[in-house]
Image (cartoon, rainbow, N blue to C red):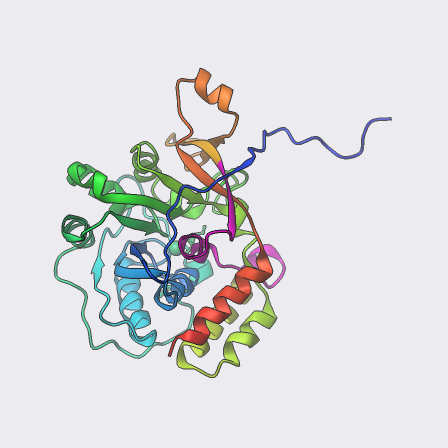
Amino acid sequence: MADAVATPTFYPAPAVTRTAPVGTVEHPLPLIIDSDPGLDDALAIGLAVARPEINLLAVTTVGGNADVRHCTTNALRLLNVYGARDVPVAEGSAGALFGSVVRATEIHGEAGIGNTVLPESPVAARAEGAVDLIAGILRKHPEPVVIAPIGPLTNIALLLRLHPELASRIAHICLMGGSIGDGNTTVSAEFNVYADPEAAAIVFESGLPITMMGLDVTHQATLHPPAGARLRELGTRSGSVAAELVAYALEREGQWYGTPRMAVHDAVAIAHLAIADLVAVAAYDVQVDTGSGPARGRTVCDGLARRVERKGRTLNAQVGIRIDRERFEDILVDAYRRLP
Ligand code: BDR
Ligand code: CA
C-alpha cells in the first residue's frame, strides 16, 4: 500500500552557519532600515531601537503597505514614540520601478498602521531623499553598514544603480521578502517582491551578501492574542502602541487566514542582526521571476548545490528556514519593555 504521507517534491537545503554579521553590546551593528511602515514594520523599528546590539543610523521609507507619504509620517512618529527622534528619516520612492503600484492596505489600513493615531513628531523628514541619505551615510560611516530592507526593494535597487561605487560600503543586506514556498500576495509571490520584482532582481543579482527572511520563516514568527495582552500590560506608551498595532493585525490577518495571528515578518530580519542563534538559515540560489505571468514576483529558490553549479549560478543568499516562535515573542515583548 502506498505511503499516505506525500514526499516533498522540493529539495530542502540544510542549515548552514550564518554569514550575516551580528551586533554586540560592545560593538553595535551600524544599520539602516528601509521600510514601509506598516504594522510589522512598526514593531521591527521598535525592536531595532530597543536592542543595544544595533546602532540605528537611519530609517528610509518606500511606498508599499501604504502611500509613501503615510509611511514617512509613520516612521517619524514611531521613532518619536520610541524615544529615538534623533534617528534621521528620509522619504524614498512612491512606487515600483515599472508597472502598477501595489498596496497592502487591506491588511495594514489606509494609513499603514491600522487605526492607530500617533502624536505628531516635532522632527521633519530630511530634505534629501532616501537614496541620497543612504548614500551619504555609506560614504561617511567609518565602517561598512548593514541595510535591512523590509519593504519593496525600489530604493535599494536605485541606490545600487545610482551609486555602484558604494556597494563595497554595504556590509550585508538582511531583507524581509520572498518565499521558498507559496507567496502571500499571489500564490507565487510575497508582497515586498511582488510590489517591485525588477528592483528585487537587481538586489539579488548584485553580488552583495544577502540574507532573505521570507515567508517560510516569518510565518513561524507569529503573535497571538496573549502576546497583545503582554504588550499592553507593560504599561508604557510604546507598549500600548505595539498592543494596538497587534490587535489590528490579529483581526485583519485573522480575516485573511482564518485565525487571529500576526506574522511579524519584518522583525525577523532585525532580530537576526541582534541575536546570533535565533534564526536558522540555509544557502540558496534565489532568482526573481520578472515575467508577466502568474509567477511574477516569485523568488525561485534552488538549494541543490550541484544543480546550481550546473546552471552556472551561485548560492547568492542565505534564506531563513526556522525560528523559535516563543523565544521570538519573548524577545519582542522584552524589547518593548526597554522602550519608553
Ligand atoms: C511583508 O509585506 C508587508 O505587508 C509587510 O510589512 C512585510 O514587509 C510581508 O509579506
Ligand atoms: Ca514591510
Residue at coordinates 33% horizontally, 61% vertically from top-left? Answer: 26
Q: In the image, is 238 to the left or to the right of 255? A: left
Give x and y (percent) for residue 60. Answer: 25, 57
Extreme residue toward the right, this view: 1
Q: Residue at x 45, y 15 (%)?
A: 310
Q: Is residue 234 left or right of residue 26?
A: right
Snapshot quadrant of residue 122: bottom left
Q: Is residue 24 left or right of residue 7?
A: left
Location of the N terminus (image quadrant): top right
Query: In the rendered image, which quarter contains the C terminus?
Result: bottom left
Decide whether residue 170 is among the magenta residues.
no
Image: 230 above or below 319: below
Q: Indicate whether 330 appears above or below 203.
A: below
Residue 296: where, in percent of width, then height? 42, 35
The answer to whether residue 294 is visible is no
| Highlighted magenta segment, given as a residue range | 253-282
Number of marks in picture:
0
Res 216 quadrant in image: top right
- Look at 19% across and 73% down and name the residue there: 123
Residue 267 within the segment the image draws in magenta: yes
Q: Position of residue 270 (x, y in %)?
A: 40, 56
Q: Quadrant of ligand 2?
A: bottom left
76 vs 231, nearest the viewer = 231
User: Where is 187 relative to 45, above or below?
Assistant: above
Front one among 154 and 268: 268
- Where is 115 relative to 44, above or below? below
